[in-house]
């Protein structure tokens, strides 16, 4: 069967004289001789198409499903897709949507006229290390000497093991000796002792070791022979802040340091496991349209300027982008 259209001839010599309602000027006389006319409104029956469909209903359905003012796109970002190099850091990496230089895959394409952005899901590794690069340094001073800087060994420790490790590290330094510790497993506080007066300079230390041992982040004003934790020790990271600099601040969560904070991800799972987080926030702040050709993923410990030390374990994120399809 072919698709040949045989033109309809309503002006034959045998019938032209018998059809009173057909003429060369009749707009319906050539309806069957071409199929162009069905696309024009003059072939509508009143306020309906020829199939009796209401044009307004048709337009409503068309605009809702096929030509909406805005559309939603889901975007998957995975750290495993960034190129492996000596400076690879899965707490601070950039994904370029059309550049294979930094990414092992790129199937995104640029996104124009983005007016909304929010996190849907996140998979983040909860570091197994109690001591890492961010909290291993401690400055201490004996009353008869100068400042000494020690570095704890990175790794995983229990409450008691960490106390023992601190003392062995202090006494293992050539400039220090005579330190002992009391580990209270009821209050989870430490008492650090020495027969010679000394001073622990927490704020002069590099990082957040003061949290590991339950002290305030300050340098003691005077020397003493004993120091007891001010607070219960904090030997795990409670949450990480997801920061993306390319997203306008109006769409971010306000915070004390003014970072482009997309969401705060709690790490309420066992150390060494993966936190599966789903955002339950549906609020979306629209912003002036921007074009996105990359995203810089940064994970920070709490609200500090310290990047989260996840030992380069991979993470992944699912975002929702709102795209403006029509310019106002």
Image (cartoon, grey):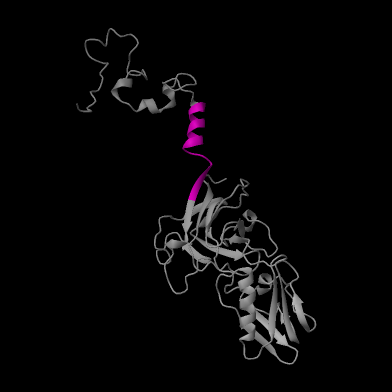
Q: Is residue 222 above or below residue 78?
A: below
Q: Is residue 154 left or right of residue 179?
A: left
Nearer the observer, 299 or 268: 268
Q: Is residue 58 magenta?
A: yes
Which region is colored magenta? 56-74
Looking at this rendering, what residue extends furthest in the bottom direction? Answer: 144
Residue 8, horizontal then vertical, whole percent:
26, 20
Question: Would you say residue 30 is visible in this rendering?
Answer: no
Q: Is residue 212 magenta?
A: no
Looking at this rendering, what residue extends furthest in the top direction? Answer: 18
Question: Would you say residue 187 is visible in this rendering?
Answer: yes
* Residue under the image location 64 percent in, 55 percent down: 250
Name the quadrant containing residue 194: bottom right
Residue 47, horizontal then vertical, whole percent:
50, 21
Nearer the observer, 7 or 161: 161
Q: Is residue 176 above or below residue 61?
A: below
Figure quadrant of the N terminus = top left
Count up the numbered dots.
Answer: 0
Nearer the observer, 85 or 109: 85
* Residue under the image location 80 percent in, 81 percent down: 221
Residue 282, horizontal then vertical, whole percent:
61, 45
Q: Is residue 160 above or below residue 12?
A: below
């Amino acid at each position: 069967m072919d698709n040949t259209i045989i033109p309809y001839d309503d002006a034959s010599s045998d019938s032209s004289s018998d059809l009173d309602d057909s003429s060369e000027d009749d707009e319906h006389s050539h309806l069957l001789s071409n199929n162009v006319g069905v696309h024009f409104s003059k072939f509508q029956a009143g306020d309906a198409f020829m199939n009796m469909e209401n044009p307004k209903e048709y337009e409503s359905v068309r605009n809702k499903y096929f030509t909406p003012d805005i559309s939603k796109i889901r975007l998957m970002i995975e750290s495993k897709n960034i190129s492996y190099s000596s400076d690879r850091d899965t707490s601070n990496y950039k994904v370029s949507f059309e550049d294979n230089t930094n990414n092992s895959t790129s199937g995104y394409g640029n996104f124009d006229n983005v007016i909304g952005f929010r996190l849907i899901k996140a998979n983040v590794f909860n570091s197994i290390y109690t001591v890492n690069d961010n909290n291993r340094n401690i400055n201490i001073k004996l009353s008869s000497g100068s400042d000494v800087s020690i570095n704890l060994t990175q790794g995983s420790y229990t409450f008691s093991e960490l106390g023992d490790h601190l003392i062995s590290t202090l006494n293992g330094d050539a400039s220090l000796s005579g330190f002992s510790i009391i580990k209270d497993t009821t209050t989870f506080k430490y008492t650090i002792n020495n027969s010679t007066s000394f001073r622990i300079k927490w704020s002069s230390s590099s990082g957040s070791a003061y949290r590991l041992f339950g002290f305030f982040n300050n340098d003691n004003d005077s020397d003493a022979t004993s120091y007891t934790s001010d607070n219960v020790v904090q030997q795990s990271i409670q949450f990480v802040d997801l920061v993306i600099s390319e997203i306008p601040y109006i769409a971010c969560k306000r915070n004390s340091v003014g970072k482009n904070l997309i969401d705060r991800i709690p790490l309420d799972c066992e150390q060494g496991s993966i936190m599966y987080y789903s955002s339950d926030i549906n609020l979306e702040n629209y912003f002036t349209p921007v074009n996105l050709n990359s995203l810089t993923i940064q994970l920070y410990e709490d609200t500090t300027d310290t990047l989260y030390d996840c030992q380069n374990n991979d993470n992944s994120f699912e975002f929702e982008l709102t795209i403006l399809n029509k310019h106002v």
